[in-house]
Image: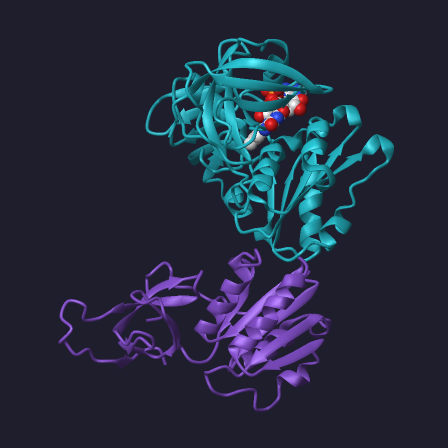
Amino acid sequence: MLTSTNKSRPVYPGLAPRPFAQRHLIAAEGEGAAAVAELVAAGAADFAAKASILYTAGASAPSDPAGRLGALGADSLATFPSIETLLFRLDAMLATAGMGTALYVTGTEGFIGRVIALAAGHGIDHLTIAAEHRGSLARRVQCVHCKGFTENVTTSVVACSHCALPLTVRDHYSRRLGAFQGVCVNAEDPSEAPVAEEVFR
Amino acid sequence: MIAPQIRVRVRDVEEVARRVKRFRLEPADGGALPAFSGGAHVTVSMPAGGARPLKNPYSLTGAPGETAFYEIGVEKVEGGRGGSAFMHEAVRPGTELFIAPPANLFPLVARARKHLFVAGGIGITPFLAMAAQAAARGDRFELHYAARTSDDCAFADLLMQRYGGAVHFYHSDRGARLDLAALVAHQPLGTHLYVCGPERLITATLDAGRCAGWPEQHLHAEHFASPPSGDPFDIRIAGSDRIVPVAADQSMLEALEAAGLAPRYLCRGGACGECETAVVACDGTLEHHDHFLSDADKAAGKKVMICISRLKGREVTLVV
Ligand SMILES: Cc1cc2nc3c(=O)[nH]c(=O)nc-3n(C[C@H](O)[C@H](O)[C@H](O)COP(=O)(O)OP(=O)(O)OC[C@H]3O[C@@H](n4cnc5c(N)ncnc54)[C@H](O)[C@@H]3O)c2cc1C
């Protein structure tokens, strides 16, 4: 699936410190904590002093068991109980941030997509956001039929969490929604029983 | 692609600053002109310079959405091939000219949270339409406009009237300097910066942005470049015996057009990449003047932007 030729499928080049940035705003989820540690290590001596880290364990399991983020010496570190609460805080921070603030995001693809979509609402070009995929390949999927979102999808086919239709998860990705497209698999013949395969672990 | 030319008639000419005239152009055959967006330019063909028509790009300064007429603002520059002098001296109400339809290499970024415009001298022209478009959309913007003196500051009254506090003037004869570092230091995240004016201003503005941590995607520039003169040389058309001579004050694109060929072009200022041409052989050194090719491409010498670059040498073989 990661070798898709679908042009809408995003690629994440990885986190690298943006030179000359005045502030570093880092949003991390789950296993993204390790990528943040590497980012800070790669940065100049004053990187941590200019960095604000927003972290949530998210849905993809391990939080930051070793408390590595706390040891990085960032200007501020805030931990959130959920992706939603993190995004709420990030939204407020983006609203008051200045140009010269570099935005970094790392974690699952669903998380990355939601941060990029939020940033776009603040006029930030998505190509300026450093992103690194860490952790599960689970996808955020939008059902094309009822428009409902299903989080953490690891299989195709998957049942829509809103309308229950069996959905094939396509590689077609919407940057605006931060979600992959899910299309009913047996629309022609509803009696056909689809098999769910785990493909986005 | 050579878009069909539009025949226009000059409706009126107005002096809007020392050495700057504004021309209103209406369709000679009635009807409406193509719609355009802020930052667009048209290429005006001028029967100047004797046998061969001269084609200069000029930014549209009217409000986007106005299709009954176009407005351009032209500064008279000394020397050169005389296109701007022709506009100032020979063009009057009633004169008919041909223009190519609008092209835009300097558009507003639709999702910007704020637009920051930096203009130097005649570089104000694209911002007239961009500011009008931003205002019509309710976008936040600021215009910072540097000119030598208030006599050189074209469109100042109009800008003041329309946008008041959003416009800031800097006249160097009064010692008012535009502090670029301070300007870019305090802008909200999501701001896009656009600069047009003398090369020195463009370079200084982009550098100030980069040093303050602005990413390239939020920095935009329009260069009013025109083909520099040099020594004459020849173009050999690949796959034929045809030789097209290029005069000292002529660009390769102009020489090919004069020879009856019709290479693709859009900006004629080395910015858009439309006239990129493959180089097969080269007896001499290519002088790249464009802002399009990468340094690696320029060094490799396999491509050239014929609207603005030249050869220092005897002959270059091009795929035309
Ligand atoms: C996208 C774009 C938009 C533009 N918009 C505008 C606009 O809105 N308003 C505007 O006024 N201009 C604009 N320009 C610039 C315009 O197209 C012309 O370049 C300008 O009017 C000068 O044209 P010219 O024929 O008079 O002189 P050119 O021959 O083009 O010469 C231009 C400059 O080169 C020097 N030069 C060239 N050859 C010689 C020589 N042999 N000896 C001495 N000096 C020489 C001249 O002194 C002059 O400063 C724009 C350019 C571009 C690319």
What color does chain B have in the rendering?
A: cyan
Q: In screen coordinates, is B156 left or right of A169? A: right
| Placement of A118 over or under A70, stated as above or below | above
| Placement of B292 over or under A21, stated as above or below | above
- Name the quarter where the N terminus of chain A is drawn: bottom left
Residue at the image point whose x is 67% and y is 59% from the top:
A100
- Name the quarter where the C terminus of chain A is drawn: bottom left
| Frontmost residue, B43 versus A153 | A153
- Residue B22 x, y percent position in the rendering: 62, 20
Q: Is residue B78 among the parts visible in the rendering? A: no
| Frontmost residue, B85 versus B91 | B91
The colour mode here is by chain
Q: Is residue A14 among the parts visible in the rendering? A: yes
Number of numbered discs on residues: 0
Residue at the image point whose x is 37% and y is 21% from the top:
B242
What color does chain A have in the rendering?
A: purple
Q: In screen coordinates, is B210 left or right of B108? A: right
- Residue B310 x, y percent position in the rendering: 54, 29
Residue most toward the right? B174
| Placement of B1 over or under A189, stated as above or below | above
| Placement of A75 over or under B24, stated as above or below | below
- Residue B12 x, y percent position in the rendering: 59, 14
- Residue A32 x, y percent position in the rendering: 53, 78
Q: In screen coordinates, is B252 left or right of B248? A: left
| Frontmost residue, A58 versus A30 | A58
| Frontmost residue, A188 versus A9 | A188
Q: Residue A50 appears in which quarter of the rendering?
A: bottom right
Q: Quadrant of ligand 1?
A: top right
Residue at the image point whose x is 55% and y is 43% from the top:
B137
